């Protein structure tokens, strides 16, 4: 473990004395982030507009995956640099089998799990007998029913992660994020000893994917149980000795303190929920809070920082997300932005929308 980056036990994990409160918006929030929250918003969600003084040169692509470029390209993302070590990307641990009728059917290691997916607004492709084979099922009213709901582990991209059916219907993993790991590793490969800030870091899958590849990671989540779960996943994955700072805190409050301390980060992974709660019950709402959060991130970002921003809020446009990044990070000419839908394709062929993402290398 690197000096100054030691893991801190439970409690007040911020070494500079920041608030370390566990609060709602986490594992058992009745309106959790992700697909469950997706069903709540009826109208398109717009991020609070900020200044628009950065000119874009042109766009290519379609609404599914739009590339927003500043001329010219300057980044070689060939991934030849071995300083970030890639791990295997084809572990057969989790697989979306089908989606439809507002639900998703996943094989998660040894168990079949049937749970809500409000964006699956079409009929299932697999026959009812395949869905009936699920080991456990979650419904808002009935909770978890079926068989064994004790924790179990899955192998994902070289990691061992514990899954647990939570009261909110989550299982502790958002498999759609795994697809971003190769890009993060390759993009960070140009940094010697990269330092990454992972906000709203949940149970730590992305934290561990980056730590396993050689990054120093600061893992921030408001939920103490989520951070404890992430540390458990680090142990299961044989990564407990990696330079990971485990922080239980409000994301905005933590970054602002990092700014006052003069800390800088080479990478950002930001996956805010649609709704959450900050310290002392303050309400987090993505559309209102995101611009200030991104401004605070930009203030602690190196000039060539790698940024991945994902969101699962219904009606949120990927271009708005990219605009929010541009406004905050004020990128240098030549920077490539990617704004895209997040989707998972099931083995059945169903394509499940799961949110939007914007990513860039700042300069
Ligand atoms: C959508 S989940 C993140 C999923 C994660 N990126 C993954 O792939 O597993 C949202 C997380 O944000 C946390 N959270 C909610 N409000 C927060 C806040 N104000 N500050 C920090 N974390 C917060 C919750 O505890 C939860 O773990």
Image: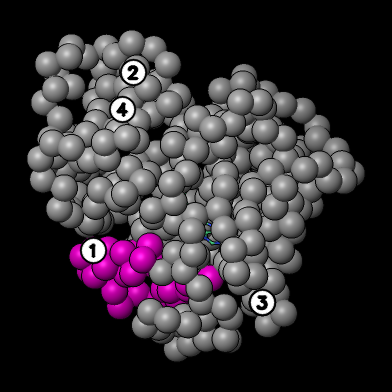
Of the pair 30 and 150, the residue shown nearer to us: 30
Q: Give the residue drawn at x 18%, y 12%.
A: 127
Quadrant for residue 110, please give it: top left
Would you say residue 230 sits in the magenta stretch?
yes
Q: Give the residue drawn at x 35%, y 74%.
A: 242
Mark 4 and mark 3: span between their CA atoms? Answer: 40 Å
Position of 16 relative to 84 (above/below): below
Q: Give the residue drawn at x 58%, y 86%.
A: 16
**308 sits to left or right of 152:** right
The tag earlier along the polypeptide, 1 or 2, is 2
**For the residue carrying disc 2, how many other residues have a C-alpha within 10 Å: few (<14), some (14-19), or many (20+)?**
many
Q: Which residue in the protein does label 4 denote?
A: 104
Label of residue 100 in the image: 2
Quadrant for residue 147, please give it: top left
Q: Is residue 94 visible?
A: no
Mark 1 and mark 2: span between their CA atoms? Answer: 33 Å
Mark 2 and mark 3: span between their CA atoms? Answer: 44 Å
The location of residue 6, given as percent across then percent down, is: 41, 84
Q: Which residue in the protein does label 3 denote?
A: 257
**115 sits to left or right of 326:** left
Q: Which residue in the protein does label 1 denote?
A: 237
Q: Secondary structure at mark 1?
A: loop
Q: Give the residue drawn at x 31%, y 27%.
A: 104
Asked which colour scheme the image uses, the reply is: one colour
């Amino acid at each position: 473990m690197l000096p100054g980056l030691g893991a801190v036990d439970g409690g007040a994990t911020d070494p500079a004395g920041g608030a370390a409160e566990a609060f709602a918006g986490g594992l058992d929030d009745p309106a959790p982030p992700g697909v469950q929250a997706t069903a709540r918003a009826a109208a398109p969600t717009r991020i609070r507009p900020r200044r628009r003084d950065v000119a874009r040169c042109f766009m290519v692509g379609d609404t599914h995956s739009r590339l927003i470029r500043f001329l010219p390209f300057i980044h070689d993302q060939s991934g030849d640099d071995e300083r970030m070590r890639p791990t295997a990307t084809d572990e057969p641990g989790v697989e979306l089998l089908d989606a439809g009728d507002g639900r998703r059917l996943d094989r998660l290691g040894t168990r079949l799990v049937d749970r809500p997916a409000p964006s699956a607004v079409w009929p299932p492709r697999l026959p009812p007998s395949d869905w009936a084979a699920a080991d456990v099922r979650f419904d808002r009213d009935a909770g978890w029913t079926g068989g064994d709901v004790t924790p179990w582990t899955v192998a994902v991209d070289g990691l061992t992660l514990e899954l647990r059916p939570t009261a909110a219907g989550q299982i502790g993993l958002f498999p759609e994020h795994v697809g971003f790991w190769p890009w993060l590793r390759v993009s960070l490969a140009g940094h010697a000893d990269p330092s990454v800030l992972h906000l709203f870091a949940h149970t730590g899958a992305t934290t561990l994917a980056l730590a396993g590849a050689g990054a120093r990671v600061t893992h921030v989540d408001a939920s103490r149980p989520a951070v404890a779960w992430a540390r458990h996943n680090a142990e299961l994955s044989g990564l407990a000795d990696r330079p990971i700072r485990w922080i239980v805190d409000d994301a905005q409050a933590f970054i602002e303190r990092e700014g006052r301390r003069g800390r800088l980060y080479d990478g950002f992974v930001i996956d805010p929920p649609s709704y959450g709660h900050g310290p002392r019950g303050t309400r987090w709402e993505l559309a209102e809070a995101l611009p200030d959060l991104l401004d605070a991130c930009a203030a602690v970002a190196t000039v060539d920082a790698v940024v991945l921003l994902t969101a699962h809020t219904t009606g949120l446009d990927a271009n708005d997300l990219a605009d929010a990044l541009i406004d905050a990070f004020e990128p240098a000419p030549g920077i490539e932005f990617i704004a895209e839908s997040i989707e998972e394709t099931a083995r059945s062929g169903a394509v499940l929308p799961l949110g939007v993402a914007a990513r860039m290398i700042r300069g």
